[in-house]
Image: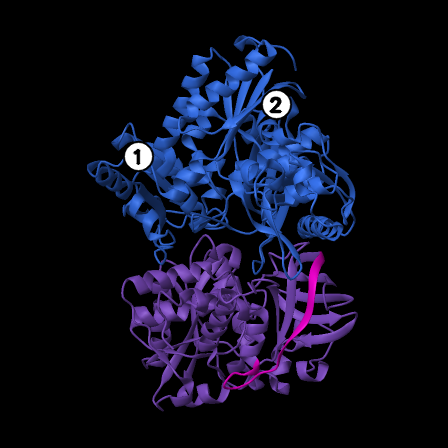
Chain colours: A purple, B blue
């Protein structure tokens, strides 16, 4: 994979689709990358399938409210400071950068940091999509320590977290984030090559680029971009089940804020070949889809609401009455569907009453 | 008495209005000499009605000139850009998102200085005053005459932008300044983009507003004149000189506002069918519903207040083809409608011909469409109505059937009931909706800022927001006793535990009238 000014829009569109309704607007991320690429940055991407054994990677991300990100832009150099601090604590240098979250704006920051530090970026992440909290990561599921975690503000003030578990780090860092201005730049989850092989969701940067391209090419050829997106997953190198769950029109959106999350549900009435009603529940990201009361998709499988003509993803904040959307379900990577993983980011981890059932079984 | 003028890409329309009533109207093709066209149009409506210029209390003008100038990248000036933000935001420099052609027209003169605010109003850094002064001297040395000023979270506190303006003015006394806080809402890059657009247009706007003034002086009209902006409210001439960018998309807005006035409906779906396209939008409390997503203008992303309009390729001149099933549009004969259409002696089958053949409309030479079969006419009508129904369904705000108001010259195409419409109204004078919309526009004021419900409380925050929105409407020219709150939007900030809420409040009021012309 090679990121250029030409394929940047594809990559960003793909990352927004993997955002499953959340993850923040990647517009600013695209501009950050555009700036680095114009300066001549050559961002090297490493295939997780053939990592050298001496790879030692650090995950980087922006933490905070997407609504703040649109004013106070994520900060590359501050993230570099966080990385350096983690190195100081460990007494060891990193030789690769890695995204923790492939969906939304956080897909872009690691690429910026890779460019700034002249380090390669690993084509894998810990979510394969977007999730709202720091413990909702496959690395955590399979025993990788988030600590030392460091968060840094725009001035280079930083805080180091040494906690008993990832959920504790999330709790403390979220509070500090408010003091830092509602946005902070983080580095955590230091990982060896073996840990990456064992716990990461692989090839997710490539996936963003490929699905973004599939959608664009379908538009250019006047084919159905949603069908093209689904076909991509079904025929990929590691095929994943992907299906259209519902084709409908938004008839109601309920949205409120609880415990710092955007919580609610969207109701759709069927059009064309879809009949009845579809309800999608969300908590920043889409969690559960039901068709006439029957569950058809559950988190961590990906549920996306796409504009039914262009396949442009629609976020939970932007959904409104009258949107014509196709709701699609995409199977999460196998590493995200184990019992241990579901304890951390299955439906019940979000306070839902349903258990996880695979898309394939529900189909 | 007031005069409404709509300077469109194709036609310039004028109406003379006495209160709600249209006394006289005029339509002519828009000419290169826009000022002359306006003089012509107003002179004509005054002559028709025998009204003396002194009785005109105000003149309202809608224009697409600034939109066109920006999109074409013509007549723009180079802009100095100062952003108060460091050490934040350096990862995205100004102008990054502008297409090369526009970026070249605006030049590469950006200055990032220490400053900016956090979401809760604390300073990121104190303003770097000496850095601002240095930037100003550099801008002066380059001979730039227009400066765009932005600052992180300036929608919650405009002090730093104002101070920057002071410092720059001190260095370059006759400089044109655009402050982002006056232009856009939360979203630094989109707001800054709009600020830069505006700064690039200020010299043109001075000339255009000057030509308007000149035109009115030629007519001996002493009354103030206003220009309509994209959300259907008015700006004073002085305001347009400073903020030309706010006129973008005022065209569809005016036609929707005109539809509201002509039909007497405050809440309705408006279908404006022209010769080439149909614009469909929703009136809420007499104003067009705004778009929730960012709007690109000439390829540049902005966060303007813009009407949420769905456009389709259906109009009086839409081509009708009968092969493999009958189709209507999306292409059309365009401005050659009166030459190419069958009923006007042409050789091209259009939507207008179908309507005439059906017997529902009587224009042109009916005998020229006698050869159409009953099946063709039926299929054509069905397709026209299906297209309109589908567009209505796309913009509707609820499941229930909506009242539909039809305006525009192409509204004759609709001859039957529409699915999804509880009632279809085609008001008299519907072809003048644009100019009437300009003529009756109100004045608005808006705030968009983040409040902390935890520290200030919801009630106090809402009250403060409403007061500020009203004050802005009055400052923009509304009479104080007519100002009311039109819209309140609360957007809780996710991930932020401290009860931070983004509040968007819009107030509108009638234009304060000072004249002695009577008639209201």
Q: Secondary structure at mark 2?
A: helix
Q: Which residues are magenta?
A: A234-252
Q: Residue at x 63, y 31 (%)?
A: B431
Q: Residue at x 29, y 68 (%)?
A: A41
Q: Is residue B476 left or right of residue B90?
A: right
Residue A351 visible, this orientation: no
Is the residue A176 above or below the residue A56 in the image?
A: above
Per the image, the residue denoted by label 2 is: B480
Choose the circle earlier in sequence order: 1 or 2.
Answer: 1
Please name which of the two marks, 1 or 2, marks the residue nearer to the observer: 2
Nearest the eye: B370 or B505: B370
Circle on res. B167: 1
Q: Residues within 10 Å of mark 2 (few under 14, many from 20)?
A: some
Nearest the eye: B446 or A157: B446
Is the residue B233 above or below the residue A121 in the image?
A: above
Can you give x and y, in whole percent of width and height, for residue B182 in the image? 46, 37
């Amino acid at each position: 994979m090679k990121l250029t000014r030409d394929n940047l829009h594809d990559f960003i569109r793909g990352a927004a689709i993997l955002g499953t309704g959340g993850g923040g607007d990647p517009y600013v991320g695209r501009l950050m990358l555009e700036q680095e690429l114009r300066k001549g940055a050559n961002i090297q991407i490493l295939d997780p399938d053939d990592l050298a054994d001496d790879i030692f990677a650090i995950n980087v991300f922006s933490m905070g409210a997407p609504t703040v990100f649109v004013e106070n832009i994520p900060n590359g150099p501050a993230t570099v400071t966080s990385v350096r601090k983690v190195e100081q604590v460990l007494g060891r240098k990193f030789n690769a950068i890695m995204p923790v979250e492939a969906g939304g704006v956080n897909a872009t920051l690691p690429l910026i940091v890779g460019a700034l530090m002249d380090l390669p970026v690993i084509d894998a992440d810990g979510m394969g999509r977007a999730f709202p909290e720091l413990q909702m990561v496959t690395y955590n599921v399979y025993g990788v320590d988030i600590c030392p975690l460091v968060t840094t503000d725009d001035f280079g003030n930083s805080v180091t977290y040494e906690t008993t578990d990832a959920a504790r780090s999330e709790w403390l860092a979220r509070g500090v984030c408010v003091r830092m201005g509602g946005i902070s730049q983080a580095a955590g989850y230091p990982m060896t090559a073996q840990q990456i092989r064992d716990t990461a969701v692989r090839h997710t940067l490539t996936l963003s680029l490929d699905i973004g391209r599939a959608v664009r090419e379908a538009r250019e050829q006047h084919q159905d971009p949603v069908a093209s997106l689904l076909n991509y997953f079904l025929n990929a190198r590691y095929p994943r089940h992907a299906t259209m769950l519902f084709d409908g029109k938004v008839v109601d959106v309920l949205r409120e804020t609880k415990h710092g999350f955007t919580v609610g549900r969207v109701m759709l009435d069927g059009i064309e070949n879809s009949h009845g009603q579809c309800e999608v529940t969300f908590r920043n990201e889409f969690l559960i889809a039901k068709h006439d009361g029957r569950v058809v998709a559950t988190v961590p499988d990906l549920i996306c609401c796409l504009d039914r003509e262009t396949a442009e993803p629609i976020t939970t904040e932007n959904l409104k009455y009258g949107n014509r959307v196709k709701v699609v379900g995409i199977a999460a990577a196998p590493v995200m569907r184990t019992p241990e993983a579901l304890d951390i980011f299955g439906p019940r981890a979000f306070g839902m009453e349903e258990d996880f059932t695979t898309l394939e079984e529900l189909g | 008495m007031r005069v409404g003028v709509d300077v469109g890409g194709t036609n310039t329309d004028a109406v003379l209005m006495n209160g709600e009533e249209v006394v006289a109207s005029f339509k002519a093709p828009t000419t290169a000499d826009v000022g002359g066209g306006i003089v012509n149009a107003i002179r004509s409506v005054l002559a028709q009605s025998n009204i003396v210029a002194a009785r005109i209390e105000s003149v309202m003008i809608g224009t697409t000139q600034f939109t066109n100038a920006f999109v074409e990248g013509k007549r723009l000036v180079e802009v100095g850009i100062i952003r108060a933000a460091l050490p934040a935001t350096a990862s995205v420099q100004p102008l990054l998102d502008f297409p090369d052609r526009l970026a070249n027209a605006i030049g590469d003169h950006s200055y990032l200085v220490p400053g900016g605010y956090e979401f809760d109003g604390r300073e990121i850094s104190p303003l770097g005053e000496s850095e601002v002064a240095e930037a100003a001297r550099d801008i002066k040395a380059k001979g730039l005459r227009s400066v765009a000023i932005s600052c992180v979270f300036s929608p919650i506190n405009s002090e730093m932008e104002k101070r920057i303006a002071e410092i720059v003015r001190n260095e370059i006394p006759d400089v044109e300044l655009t402050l982002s806080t006056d232009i856009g809402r939360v979203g630094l890059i989109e707001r800054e983009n709009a600020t830069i657009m505006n700064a690039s247009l200020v010299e043109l706007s001075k000339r255009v507003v000057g030509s308007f003034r000149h035109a009115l002086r030629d007519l001996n009209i002493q009354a103030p004149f206003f220009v309509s902006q994209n959300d259907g409210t008015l700006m004073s001439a002085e305001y347009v000189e400073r903020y030309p960018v706010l006129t973008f998309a005022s065209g569809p807005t005016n036609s929707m506002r005109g539809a509201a006035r002509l039909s007497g409906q405050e809440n309705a779906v408006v279908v404006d069918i022209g010769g080439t396209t149909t614009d469909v939008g929703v009136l809420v409390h007499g104003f067009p519903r705004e778009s929730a997503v960012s709007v690109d203008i000439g390829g540049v992303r902005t966060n303007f207040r813009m009407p949420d309009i769905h456009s389709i390729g259906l109009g009086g001149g839409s081509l009708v083809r009968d092969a493999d099933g009958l189709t209507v549009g999306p292409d059309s004969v365009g401005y050659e409608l009166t030459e190419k259409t069958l009923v006007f002696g042409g050789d091209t089958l259009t939507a207008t011909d179908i309507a005439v053949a059906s017997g529902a409309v009587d224009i042109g030479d009916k005998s020229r469409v006698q050869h159409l079969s009953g099946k063709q006419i039926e299929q054509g009508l069905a397709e026209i109505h299906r297209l309109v129904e589908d567009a209505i369904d796309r913009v509707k705000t609820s499941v229930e059937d909506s009242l539909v108001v039809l305006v525009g010259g192409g509204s004759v195409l609709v001859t039957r009931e529409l699915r999804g419409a509880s009632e279809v109204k085609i008001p008299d004078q519907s072809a003048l909706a644009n100019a009437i919309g300009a003529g009756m526009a109100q004045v608005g004021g808006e705030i968009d800022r983040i409040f902390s419900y935890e520290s200030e409380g919801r009630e106090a925050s809402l009250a403060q927001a409403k007061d500020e929105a009203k004050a802005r409407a009055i400052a923009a020219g509304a009479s104080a006793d007519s100002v009311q709150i039109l819209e309140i939007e609360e957007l809780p900030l996710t991930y932020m535990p401290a009860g931070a809420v983004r509040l968007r409040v819009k107030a509108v009021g009638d234009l304060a009238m000072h004249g002695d012309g009577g008639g209201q």
